[in-house]
Image (spheres, helix red, strand yellow):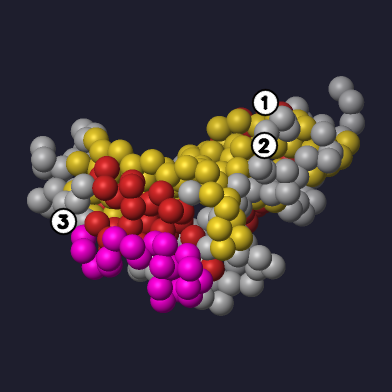
């Protein structure tokens, strides 16, 4: 058996964000990053490790396919490392896939696009189970109209109106490639047979802080009549946060997938 060497691994992760202050390590509570790093350190001979995420999900946001990379000194192969992590991690954080990749791979800088999904729950009453994973909106609205209202967002724009106040970024220009809106049954755990879920899927090359949640909040405000139908083009033109709608709650948002083009 060969001795330990410094190797780079790519991890695909799923987690329930309810118990965490977000992806990024923080002083005010448990983070997903720190939780996984703590599980990795004994597998790296007790040496500190730094996990790099493809993006920083906010407190309460969930992930179906977050990606991270880590460089660590170990002799454990990828399959054994994945099994050891899942045996140690809390059940609300899972390693879905783990592979050794070239040392140059970087989960954040090599990402070319991300896909997010937001879930809106409709019905006479909110399910005690679905409430953790969807925003309950009693009012009904036309999903096809909502998708049409979102179309001005498609393309490369200055999304300054759709970012959190106080964000520090070099540019607020981003490319949003697609927004689709669909409706269906939430599943067997719904509390009422008439309950339905609207899913809003967003695909883009990158997203500002709270950008997805502000887009969702703006669309809901348009759909429920709180904002006029031309709110989105006006917000894009004004580039001011107050021109857009409210920020949707974090618990309805999922990071679905991170894309890497022809990368590993």
Residue 26 in sight: yes
Question: CA separation, marks 2 and 3?
Answer: 38 Å
Determine whether the residue tagged by mark 3 lies in a helix, strand or loop.
loop
Say whether residue 231 is magenta. yes
Percent position of residue 86, x then y: 56, 36
Name the N-terminal-most of marks 3 and 1. Answer: 1
Q: Is residue 132 left or right of residue 126?
A: right
Question: CA separation, marks 3 and 1?
Answer: 47 Å
Percent position of residue 180, x then y: 38, 41
Q: Classify residue 160 by image quadrant.
A: bottom right
Range of residues picked out in magenta: 224-243
Q: Is residue 173 left or right of residue 235?
A: right
Which residue position holds label 2? 260
Q: Is residue 241 left or right of residue 251?
A: right
Which residue position holds label 1? 79
Query: Closer to the observer: label 3 or label 1?
Result: 3
Which residue position holds label 3? 139
In the depicted structure, whether residue 245 falls above or below residue 149:
below
Name the N-terminal-most of marks 2 and 3. Answer: 3
Name the N-terminal-most of marks 2 and 1. Answer: 1
Give me the residue at 78% from left, 40% from top.
Answer: 105
Q: Is residue 40 left or right of residue 7?
A: left
Percent position of residue 245, x then y: 36, 68
Determine whether the residue tagged by mark 2 lies in a helix, strand or loop.
loop
Say whether residue 44 is magenta. no
Q: Are marks 3 and 1 in contact (CB under 8 Å)?
A: no
């Amino acid at each position: 058996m060969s001795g330990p060497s410094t190797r780079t691994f790519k991890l695909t992760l799923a987690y329930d964000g309810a118990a965490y202050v977000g992806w990024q390590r923080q002083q005010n509570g448990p983070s997903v990053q720190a939780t996984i790093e703590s599980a990795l350190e004994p597998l790296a001979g007790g040496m500190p490790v730094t996990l790099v995420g493809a993006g920083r999900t906010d407190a309460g946001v969930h992930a179906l396919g977050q990606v991270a990379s880590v460089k660590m000194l170990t002799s454990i192969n990828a399959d054994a490392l994945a099994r050891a992590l899942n045996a140690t991690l809390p059940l609300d954080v899972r390693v879905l896939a783990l592979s050794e990749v070239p040392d140059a791979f970087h989960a954040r800088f090599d990402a070319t696009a991300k896909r997010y999904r937001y879930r809106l729950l409709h019905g006479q009453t909110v399910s005690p189970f679905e409430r953790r994973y969807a925003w309950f909106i009693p009012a009904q609205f036309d999903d096809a109209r909502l998708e049409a209202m979102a179309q001005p967002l498609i393309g490369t724009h200055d999304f300054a109106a759709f970012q959190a106040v106080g964000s520090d970024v070099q540019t607020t220009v981003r490319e949003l490639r697609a927004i689709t809106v669909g409706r269906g049954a939430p599943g067997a755990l719904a509390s009422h047979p008439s309950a339905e879920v609207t899913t809003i899927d967003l695909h883009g090359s990158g997203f500002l802080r709270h950008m997805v949640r502000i887009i969702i909040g703006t669309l809901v405000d348009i759909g429920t009549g709180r904002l006029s139908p031309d709110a989105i083009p006006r917000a894009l033109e004004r580039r001011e946060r107050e021109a857009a709608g409210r920020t949707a709650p974090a618990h309805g948002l999922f990071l679905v997938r991170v894309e890497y083009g022809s990368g590993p």
